[in-house]
Amino acid sequence: MLAALRKLRASPDALMCDGHERVGTVLRTRDGINPVYVSVGHLIDLASAERLVMACAVKYRLPEPIRLADRLAGAEKRRRAGR
């Protein structure tokens, strides 16, 4: 499934490399929307990170956990600013 999605949403030249090591991908989670940058992390390889992003970006461009964290942080900033 990810391979089919990747054909539609990422291009082969949309790779992030450190020397000869591939460390990230520019991945389009939805057609016609700006891409997100996915990279390797602690205890996760790139292929797993790509699958996780695609599984969590169901309705919006950003993966749902990141989108919700951003909304929560924005609400907290507004609350602390007294708005």
Image (cartoon, rainbow, N blue to C red):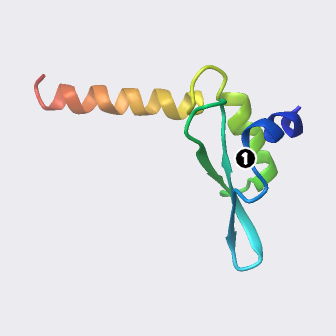
The C terminus lies in which quarter of the figure?
Answer: top left
Relative to 34, residue 13 above or below? below
In depth, the one of 82 and 18 nearer the eye is: 18
Give the residue at x 57% y 33%.
33
Q: Which residue is mark 1?
A: 49
Q: Secondary structure at mark 1?
A: helix
Number of callouts in the render?
1
- Determine the residue located farthest toward the left in the rendered image: 82
Q: Residues within 10 Å of mark 1 (few under 14, many from 20)?
A: some
Would residue 5 appear left or right of 37 to someone viewing this image?
right
Would residue 8 appear left or right of 25 to someone viewing this image?
right
Give the residue at x 47% y 26%.
68
On the image, the x and y values in percent for residue 55 come to: 73, 30
Give the residue at x 66% y 58%.
42
Disc 1 residue type (three-letter): Ala
The N terminus lies in which quarter of the figure?
Answer: top right
In depth, the one of 82 and 14 nearer the eye is: 14
In depth, the one of 76 and 7 nearer the eye is: 7
On the image, the x and y values in percent for residue 48 come to: 79, 46
